[in-house]
């Protein structure tokens, strides 16, 4: 049983095993001895302790967990041995000397605020992709003033991409190796810049500014040394070769990383495009028309439930925008390894907003479903006294040049202005059914239908439907649309027309009726089929017979004579005559004749005369 010790490391309290504490204490003392005469020694050691505390925090899962030798060994492996921190005071001389160099780090994306006009995004991207910053700024100009999406993307990157604050950050941003040499060079450049600035300055007056600059330079050295992953880079130098399987693994990891980057780009493009589209749709108040989901009409739900238009739009926006934002953020995390986290508070807030949006839409959806529970109908029947058994009835649909020009059945609703300039709500949900009747005169039945939460409400809505038709002489004109009052909720309003025609009369249907009598004949018992438009049709019992059509089998032959010894047939295909001894055929291929002794064929190849072979 070992003792535990409570320690304060960089302002954070830890419970640590006594043996682990002794090893950690020796490790820190060895590091302190390595920096005996180094400039900024206290700051460097303080940063190292802060980094160790950070690594311990990552490994502690609860407050009562005790840090043991295992955790200390892991931290030492990451931070490196004390000899890796041996730095001579000659670091600020012309020829710096190091006890040990560190390796390189991969290039990472930061915001370069040292060379920025706004937030340093353009300079950071230029470093990351290795191009001149002018091209990046030109691209932003095109996105902002051309496509209109640049501002959104720039602000997003400004928020999520971290700023290059330390010397290590700036070296990694430009892809340079994070070595003592490069750190020294970076700091020396900073000193030279400061020196040029203060050459002609009154030091008595601005002494405090110089002092502050020197302190900041020292802090930069501390921060840079702290951020050098000495162990990782040192292991690369120490490793002289790799095994075959290690090489294969590295190749596989390379392709996996490339594939992951590709997926990240796809996620970013998808998420950004969807967010921009949703945002533009929200601003233009057309989001209800922009979002489509199979079997759901959001605009209809907003209209029929009486929900405020702005509230329903916001619910739809957040229900779709939050997942696409997380998709975009995931793509950025894949593509940019050092991307700043949006924080748990933001994540949980977005999740809460999304859940509330889904719940709100579900409530409105349930309310919408209940509002369609009952059916209601209003039926009107009229007899046409002048259409009798011996009469011909012409049938056609009547459109409106202002809002119903197309002759297509459509149960959706729209708004437009009529010939008087009045706003109307209309639909082309009109169904036409034709049936035969034994009655001596024709009649029409207009069935206006609607739905509602109760039968009374449904019937009231059906009664509010406006629909017109007219019989002029023997021509019946049916409106191809219906209208409802503008303040009426849309609840599946439609009109069903059934036309009863006496047996023995004749029907002529205009071609514009085609789409309106597209019915299931087995369900609606409609006797008018497609293809019978523009023809005179005799009304029989439960069917129509064309009286001006040629029968394909019986009427195809113009002349057809048969006798005991001969046959003559003349039709659209040509002439064919046969007898007991001669056969003659004339068609589009030519003339062919034969008897028992000779065959004659005349075609485009010429004349062929052959004597048929006699059978033995």
Image (spheres, helix red, strand yellow):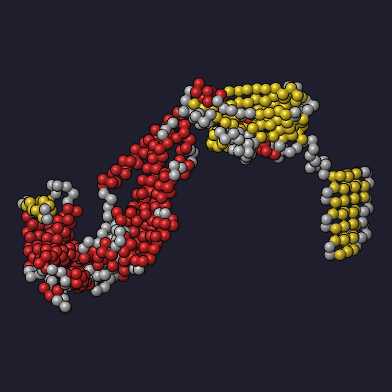
Q: Is residue 371 visible?
A: yes
Left or right of 537? Residue 113 is: left
Nearer to me, 320 or 3:
320
On-image quarter of the C terminus: bottom right
Q: Residue at x 83, y 57 (%)?
A: 589
Nearer to me, 152 or 381:
152
Q: Residue at x 51, y 24 (%)?
A: 458
**In which quadrant of the rendered view does residue 355 lie?**
top left
Nearer to me, 606 or 91:
91
Q: Residue at x 39, y 43 (%)?
A: 317
The relative height of residue 432 versus residue 6 in the rendered view (above or below) is: above
**In which quadrant of the rendered view does residue 380 lie?**
top right
* Percent x, y of residue 478: 66, 31
Left or right of 542? Residue 73 is: left
**In which quadrant of the rendered view does residue 564 lie?**
top right
* Percent x, y of residue 85: 14, 68
Q: Is residue 438 visible?
A: no
Q: Residue at x 41, y 45 (%)?
A: 283
Left or right of 303? Residue 561 is: right
* Percent x, y of residue 143: 41, 58
* Percent x, y of residue 66: 12, 51
């Amino acid at each position: 049983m070992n003792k535990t010790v409570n320690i304060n490391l960089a302002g954070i309290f830890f419970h640590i095993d006594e043996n682990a504490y002794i090893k950690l204490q020796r490790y820190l003392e060895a590091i302190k001895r390595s920096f005996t005469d180094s400039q900024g020694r206290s700051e460097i050691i303080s940063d190292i302790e802060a980094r160790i505390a950070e690594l311990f925090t990552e490994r502690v899962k609860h407050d009562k967990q005790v840090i043991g030798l295992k955790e200390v060994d892991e931290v030492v492996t990451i931070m490196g041995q004390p000899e890796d921190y041996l730095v001579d005071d000659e670091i600020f001389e012309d020829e710096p000397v190091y006890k040990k160099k560190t390796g390189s780090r991969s290039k990472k994306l930061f915001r370069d605020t040292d060379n920025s006009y706004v937030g340093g995004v353009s300079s950071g991207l230029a470093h990351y992709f290795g191009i001149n910053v002018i091209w990046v700024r030109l691209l932003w100009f095109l996105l902002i003033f051309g496509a209109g999406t640049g501002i959104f993307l720039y602000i997003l990157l400004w928020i999520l991409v971290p700023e290059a604050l330390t010397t290590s950050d700036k070296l990694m941003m430009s892809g340079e190796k994070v070595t003592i040499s490069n750190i020294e060079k970076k700091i020396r450049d900073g000193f030279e810049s400061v020196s040029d600035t203060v050459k002609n300055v009154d030091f008595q007056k601005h002494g405090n500014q110089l002092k502050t600059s020197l302190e900041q330079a020292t802090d930069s050295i501390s921060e840079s040394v702290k951020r050098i992953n000495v162990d990782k880079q040192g292991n690369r130098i120490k490793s002289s070769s790799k095994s075959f399987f290690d090489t294969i693994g590295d190749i596989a990891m390379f392709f996996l990383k490339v594939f992951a980057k590709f997926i990240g780009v796809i996620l970013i493009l998808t998420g950004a495009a969807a967010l921009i589209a949703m945002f533009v749709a929200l601003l233009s108040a057309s989001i209800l028309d922009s979002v489509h989901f199979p079997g759901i009409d959001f605009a209809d739900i907003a209209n029929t439930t009486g929900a405020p238009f702005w509230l329903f739009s916001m619910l739809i926006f957040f229900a779709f925008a939050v997942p696409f934002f997380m998709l975009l953020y995931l793509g950025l995390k894949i593509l940019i390894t050092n991307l700043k986290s949006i924080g748990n508070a933001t994540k949980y807030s977005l999740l809460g907003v999304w859940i509330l949006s889904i719940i709100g839409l579900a409530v409105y959806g349930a309310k919408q479903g209940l509002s369609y529970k009952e059916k209601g109908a209003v039926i009107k029947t009229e007899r046409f006294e002048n259409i009798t058994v011996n009469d011909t009835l012409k049938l056609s649909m009547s459109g409106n040049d202002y809002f119903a020009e197309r002759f297509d059945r459509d149960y959706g609703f729209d708004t437009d202005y009529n010939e008087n300039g009045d706003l109307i709500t209309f639909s082309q949900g009109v169904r036409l059914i034709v049936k035969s009747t034994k009655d001596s005169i024709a009649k029409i039945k207009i069935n206006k239908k609607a739905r509602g939460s109760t039968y009374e409400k449904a019937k009231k809505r059906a009664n509010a439907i406006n629909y017109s038709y007219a019989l002029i002489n023997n021509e019946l004109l049916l409106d191809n649309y219906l209208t409802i009052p503008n303040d009426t909720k849309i609840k599946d309003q439609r009109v069903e027309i059934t036309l009863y025609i006496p047996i023995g009369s004749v029907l002529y249907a205009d071609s514009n009726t085609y789409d309106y009598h597209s019915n299931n004949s087995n369900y609606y018992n409609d006797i008018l089929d497609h293809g019978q438009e523009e023809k005179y049709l005799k009304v029989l019992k439960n069917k129509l017979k064309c009286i001006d059509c040629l029968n394909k089998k019986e009427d195809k032959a113009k002349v057809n004579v048969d006798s005991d010894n001969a046959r003559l047939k003349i039709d659209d295909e040509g002439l064919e005559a046969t007898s007991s001894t001669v056969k003659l055929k004339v068609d589009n291929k030519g003339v062919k004749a034969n008897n028992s002794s000779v065959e004659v064929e005349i075609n485009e190849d010429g004349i062929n005369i052959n004597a048929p072979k006699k059978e033995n």
